[in-house]
Amino acid sequence: MPREVTDADGITWACVQAYAGLSEGTENQAAAQVSGEDDTYWVVCTPNGGAKSVRLKLDGEWETSYSDDTLLQEISSQQQQDD
């Protein structure tokens, strides 16, 4: 299930771990894991507005360990790097 956060511009971002929708199992978990980094996963955040999706590298348990503000900071930082 995606985690949703809304930024100061009113854009709602739906964030989900990469490959999460394929099926349950360790194979998909391994596919989403960042190569060579323990407990770090690729997460894709998609906006409801005109901004483009961003791909984030986040620590495991990001769904519960990252505050909304921290997640929005990660999104903003990645957007700046992508520009």
Image (cartoon, rainbow, N blue to C red):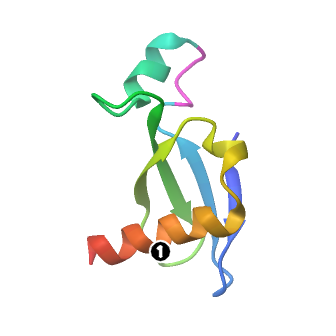
Q: Quadrant of the N terminus?
A: top right
Q: Report the magenta stretch's main SS.
A: loop
Quarter placement of the C terminus: bottom left
Between residue 81 and residue 48, name the one nearer to us.
81
Query: Is residue 2 something that shows in the picture?
Result: no
Residue 64, percent across and down?
A: 73, 44
Q: Residues within 10 Å of mark 1 (few under 14, many from 20)?
A: some
| Callout 1 amino acid | Ser
Tell me if residue 66 can be seen.
yes
Q: Is residue 32 left or right of residue 20?
A: left
The part of the image, by quadrant, that contains residue 53 is bottom left
Residue 72 vertical position relative to residue 83 in the rendered view, above or below: above
- Give the side of residue 45 with respect to residue 57, left or right: right
Q: Is residue 16 above or below residue 20?
A: below
Provide the residue designation for mark 1: 76
Give the residue displayed 47% in from the left and 50% down from the top: 44
Q: In the orientation shown, which residue stands out farthest toward the top?
A: 26
Q: Residue furthest bottom?
A: 9
Q: Which residues are magenta?
A: 20-24
Q: State the image coordinates of residue 36 (x, y, percent, origin top left).
A: 28, 28
Q: Residue at x 62, y 57 (%)?
A: 14
Q: For this view, does 61 lie left or right of residue 56?
A: right
Q: Secondary structure at mark 1?
A: helix
Task: Say whether residue 60 is magenta.
Answer: no
Q: Residue at x 47, y 74 (%)?
A: 76
Q: Residue 19: percent from the left, percent from the top?
A: 47, 31
